Image (spheres, rainbow, N blue to C red):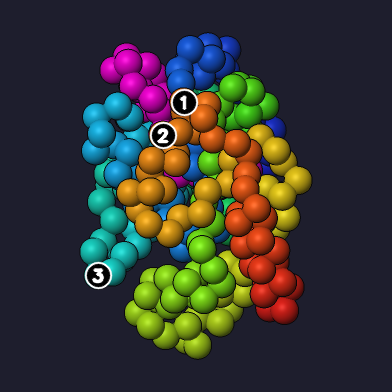
Amino acid sequence: MNLEEIIKNYHMSDEAHAVVQKTKLLLIASIAGGGKDTVVKELVKTGNFHRIVSHTTRSPRSNHGILEKDGIDYHFIDQKGATELLQEQAFVEAKYVHGNIYGTSVTEVEQAFTENKVAVTDIDIQGVVEYLGVKPDTHAVFLLPPSVDTWLDRLSRRYDGNLSDHEEELKKRFRTAYDEIKHIQADERFVLIINDDLQTTVKRVLDVLDGSVSRTSGYADKVTEHLIDYLESQV
């Protein structure tokens, strides 16, 4: 059985289920270039959050000329290591994306509980949905750029200002972004936040934890519609 098949049949252990239930969770998702990693880093600076560092079989990437670090950005593992962790049921959740494995370890979530902190991570929608299925009171946030133009500018900077050289990769990202936005429009468990000013965004996320932010706003609804209109012309 290959890794993709193993993941399709993967089930959280009773131990992992117990850890998740007792830990306060904040999951932050976004389309590519939505800024979730930056927001998570700001939350961790408050001292009230433990960042869950996920495992992955993909290679480290360079972000603005800085190579990702093992144990900081991700726990980078090979396919043999991923197989062993899956067989040991060491993950809370795991997924297969574009040929790579991504997973959240039980140890990372338990560390947040031990430190009496909120467990926070940037994660894709598939992972959020898996968590929500196990722990319905998980706080789920989806970040949106303030406009299509701002989003494209952020993506351009990610590709060193040259989107035209990455057309195939962009098509995949646009397709994924389209599917993600259509999902969060229909899934009211996600709170939509416009990520324009970083400090304002962080405050809104903290308000989500306090229960003082509603599911969405008229502005967020307009942004999602504009993004969908643009993405429909690209996919």
Q: Is residue 7 above or below residue 223?
A: above
Q: CA distance from mark 1 to mark 3?
A: 37 Å
Rendered location of residue 167, percent (x, y): 56, 82
Q: Label 2, on which residue?
A: 206
Front position among marks 1 and 3: 1
The type of residue carrying mark 3 is Gly
User: Residue 210 got which mark?
Assistant: 1
Question: What residue is at 58 percent from the left and 78 percent from the top?
Answer: 168
The residue lying toward the viewer, choosing from 172 and 36, is 36
Q: Earlier in the sequence, mark 1 or mark 3?
A: 3
Circle 3 — which element? loop
The residue lying toward the viewer, choosing from 99 and 111, is 111
Give the residues drawn in magenta, as a range.
Answer: 103-126
| Image quarter of the N terminus | top right
Question: What residue is at 59 percent from the left and 22 percent from the top?
Answer: 137
Q: Label 3, on which residue?
A: 65
| Image quarter of the C terminus | bottom right
Q: CA distance from mark 3 to mark 2?
A: 31 Å
Rendered location of residue 76, percent (x, y): 35, 47
Whether the residues at callouts 2 and 1 have beta carbons within 8 Å, the answer is: yes
Q: Is residue 80 visible?
A: no
Q: Is residue 28 above or below residue 97?
A: above
Rendered location of residue 215, percent (x, y): 63, 39
Front position among marks 3 and 2: 2
